[in-house]
Amino acid sequence: MTPADLDTARQSALLAALPEPQRVRVMEGAQVQSVETGQTIFLQDEPADALFIVLDGWVKLYRVASSGTEAVVSVMTRGRSFGEAVALRGLPYPVSAEAITPARLLRLDAARLRHLLQSDPAMATSMLAAVFVHLQHLVGQIEGLKARSGVQRVAEFLLDLSAGREGEVSVALPYNKALIAGRLGIKPETLSRAFARLRDHGVRIEAAMAHIEDVDRLRELVAEDPAKAWLR
């Protein structure tokens, strides 16, 4: 594990609230796992024998309905953790996980971590912060799906990619447009229409790049009354 890997793991929501001695104990025996694009990390309903922190790359979490339809639950990138809520309770994975780019993961054994938490209640309390972060993230996702138009969801996605930069920005779309649409809860054709409508707000899509003339204009669109945005 490289120094950069250690920094990424320490700053993840899973470990950030722990004092350094406890972080060291948690990471003892952790393994770095490399996966290729399209490789399955675990499948829905399998026993949750591990939890993961993304060190590099992108991973999608998804569920498959009885009809065979795939629903993208979340997309994880560097510093994000997944699998902890069920792994720490010894439950099956409620979703499947698949690498959508080459990725490197820190794999933590669930049984060992459960033993640590049972022997150290203070550590268990601190790690509840990770579950709370995920809850906040899911609530934010639901709010976005319910209260924002497709154009606003796409604009917010581009803002997240711009990572707080200002003015004119170019960002790479991190994965294919079909997956972006699934992640945002819209159809691929709706995504195409949203990209077209965003041209009026200074956004130009070229292949896998988004060129944003002014980040503040996108912020204004995301904050706009959804009733107006639905008409765009």
Image (cartoon, rainbow, N blue to C red):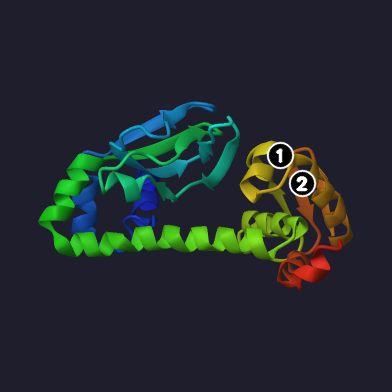
In the rendered view, would you say 137 is above or below 56?
below
**The N terminus, quarter of image:** top left
Residue plotted at (41% across, 41% down): 94
Q: Viewer-proximal residue, 43 or 6?
A: 43
Residue plotted at (57% across, 58% down): 141
Residue plotted at (84% across, 48% down): 193
Helix, strand or loop at label 1? It is helix
Q: Viewer-proximal residue, 195 or 66?
A: 66
In the rendered view, would you say 20 is above or below 100?
below
Residue plotted at (38% across, 63% down): 132
**The C terminus, quarter of image:** bottom right
**In this rendering, position of residue 212 left or right of residue 183:** right
* Rendering coords of residue 6 (x, y %): 34, 48
Q: Amino acid at mark 2?
A: Leu
**In this rendering, position of residue 185 left or right of residue 198:** left
* Rendering coords of residue 92 (x, y %): 33, 39
Nearer the N terminus, badge 1 or badge 2?
Answer: 1
Q: Pick out the residue farthest to the front.
A: 66
Q: Is residue 14 visible?
A: yes
Quarter-of-image position of residue 75: top right
Q: Pick out the residue farthest to the left.
A: 119
Quarter-of-image position of residue 140: bottom right
In three-dimensional space, the C-alpha distance between marks 1 and 2, rounded to whole angstroms, equals: 8 Å
User: On the image, numbered disc 2 is attached to which residue?
Assistant: 191
The disc placed on residue 177 is 1
Quarter-of-image position of residue 22: bottom left
